[in-house]
Image: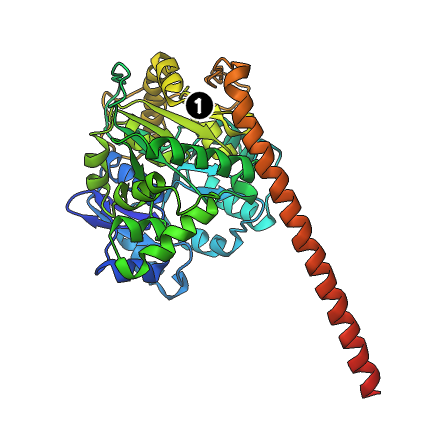
């Protein structure tokens, strides 16, 4: 009997192994302030991969000290850490070390990773290093999502690392994955994924990412069969669920983020009538199954298409998306390249032969990793144990970034518009800076006068 303890699972479970958000109506969702459906998809996929007889969950942010740890140790045979972005310069996991040390069972992270705007050497907090050391001592190897994450852990002194990718990609449990690509037509149903919260450690260039997403909104608003898939953001949820009292404010918030106007009826209609949010992973998957092509900025929104055999192209903007795209040879476009978008050109240029080969390879790596860590699973056929794959030591070549031809005459007008907008934005920021400087000066003078009067 194997009862599994999940750390940071983060969702309820319906039936045998389907993750969903347990909420009593839309207001309960709004009270939460939003969710991350990508995290739920990772949890859901892990549930489908692992064999278990029961599940408990401890969230990183909960008051775990109040838990009966002795009972938890007696009832559970293994602990799994749900994959996510745990290793960043801004995240200190030191508070979790006492919990890890109290758990008397193997602790196996599956698909964890580093987070940075670009590939760079990270200065992890000392608490995170202690957490990593404590976990590494309790498993055969730590399963990371890509070679960059493996390098970050290697720099922190953690050597027992296996590069397995993200469990979400293997949600179908199939050892091979074929991508079915239809001929292009104007009636192609295109799914779009956006992420308007890209900054800091989550974006190499926030402005470029937002402007490219703006372009996508304008283009797909004029493709009648297109759909916008949200991953749980509050404003998008309001529009998708037709919450009339809040709809106008939510619409304005999204439009403002992308420097768009309510005067564009196509964009407004697209956001209002073709935005979708699902709080149940199976329902999300069933809807995406009707899409012909997925493109955009959400890692797991695009993955939801790929594991159903649907073509997907990723726009990369941070280390997380890039290392996954490189590991699996997924077609991707680097947002830093910042160029006009031609959806038909992108679609027709996609090739998934390399992805299909990489998928089969990583499936074997994942099965070997689970076997080595003593985890029962549903991946078939079983694979022989393999050594951890670390970048620079037998790592596969990368290079699936799409290099699309550029015609100067096609690019000129778009760049002219973007440069004009950036020039205006710079002027606006300079004006705000001037007014702020004047306000600070006036406040200092007023404070000085008040101090003199008090003397």
- In the rendered image, the residue lying farthest to the front is 263
What residue is shown with label 1?
Answer: 332
Percent position of residue 128, x then y: 54, 47
Residue 286, horizontal then vertical, whole percent: 19, 35
Is residue 387 visible to us here?
Answer: no
Which quadrant: the C terminus? bottom right
Q: Residue at x 30, y 20 (%)?
A: 383
Report which quarter residue 124 is drawn in.
top right
Is residue 49 something one can see in this rendering? Answer: yes
Measured as percent of width and height from the top left, residue 399 is found at: 49, 16
Is residue 121 positioned above or below 9 on the image? above
Residue 308 vertical position relative to residue 11 in the rendered view, above or below: above
Look at the image and tell me in which quarter the N terminus lies.
Answer: top left
Name the residue at 25% across, 58% down. 26
* Badge 1 element: strand
Seen in the picture, residue 63 relative to 289 is either above or below; the reply is below
In the foreground, 149 or 210:
210
Check disc 1: other Cα within 10 Å, few if <14, some if 14-19, many if 20+.
many
Residue at left offset 38%, top offset 23% = 343
**Residue drawn at (60%, 38%), measured in percent from left and top?**
422
- The chosen color scheme is rainbow
- Depth order, front residue of 269/384: 269
Pinpoint residue 118: horizontal percent, then vertical percent: 57, 33
């Amino acid at each position: 009997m194997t009862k599994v303890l999940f750390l940071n699972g983060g969702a309820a479970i319906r039936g045998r192994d389907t993750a969903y958000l347990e909420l009593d109506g839309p207001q309960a969702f709004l009270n939460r302030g939003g969710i991350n459906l990508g995290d739920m998809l990772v949890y859901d996929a892990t549930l489908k991969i692992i064999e278990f007889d029961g599940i408990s969950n401890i969230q990183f942010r909960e008051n775990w000290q109040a838990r009966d740890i002795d009972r938890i140790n007696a009832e559970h045979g293994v602990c799994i850490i749900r994959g996510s972005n745990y290793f960043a310069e801004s995240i200190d996991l030191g508070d979790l070390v006492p919990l890890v040390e109290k758990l008397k069972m193997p602790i196996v992270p599956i698909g964890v990773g580093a987070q940075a705007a670009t590939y760079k050497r990270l200065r992890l907090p000392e608490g995170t290093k202690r957490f990593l050391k404590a976990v590494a001592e309790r498993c055969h190897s730590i399963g990371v999502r890509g070679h960059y994450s493996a390098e970050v852990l290697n720099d922190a002194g953690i050597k027992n690392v296996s590069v397995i990718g993200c469990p979400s990609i293997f949600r179908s449990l199939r050892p091979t994955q074929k991508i079915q690509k239809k001929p292009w037509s104007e009636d192609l149903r295109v799914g779009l994924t956006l992420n308007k919260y890209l900054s800091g450690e989550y974006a190499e260039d926030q402005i470029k990412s937002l402007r490219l997403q703006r372009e996508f909104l304008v283009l797909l608003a004029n493709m009648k069969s297109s759909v916008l898939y949200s991953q749980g953001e509050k404003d998008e949820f309001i529009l998708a669920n037709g919450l009339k009292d809040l709809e106008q404010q939510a619409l304005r918030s999204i439009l403002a983020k992308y420097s768009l106007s309510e005067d564009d009826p196509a964009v407004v209609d697209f956001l209002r009538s073709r935005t979708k949010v699902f709080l149940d992973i199976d329902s999300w998957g069933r809807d995406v199954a009707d899409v012909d092509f997925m493109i955009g900025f959400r890692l797991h929104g695009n993955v939801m298409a790929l594991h159903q055999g649907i073509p997907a192209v990723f726009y990369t903007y941070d280390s997380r998306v890039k290392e996954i795209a490189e590991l699996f040879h997924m077609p991707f476009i680097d947002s830093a390249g910042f160029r006009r978008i031609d959806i038909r050109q992108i679609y027709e240029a996609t090739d998934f032969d390399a992805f299909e080969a990489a998928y089969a390879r990583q499936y074997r790596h994942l099965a070997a990793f689970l076997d080595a860590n003593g985890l029962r699973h549903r991946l078939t056929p079983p694979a022989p144990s393999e050594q951890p794959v670390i970048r620079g030591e037998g790592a596969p070549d990368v290079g699936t970034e799409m290099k699309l031809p550029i015609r100067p005459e096609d690019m000129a007008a778009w760049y002219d518009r973007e440069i004009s907008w950036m020039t205006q934005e710079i002027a606006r920021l300079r004006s705000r800076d001037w007014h702020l400087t004047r306000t600070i000066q006036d406040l200092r003078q007023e404070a000085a006068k008040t101090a003199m009067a008090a003397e």
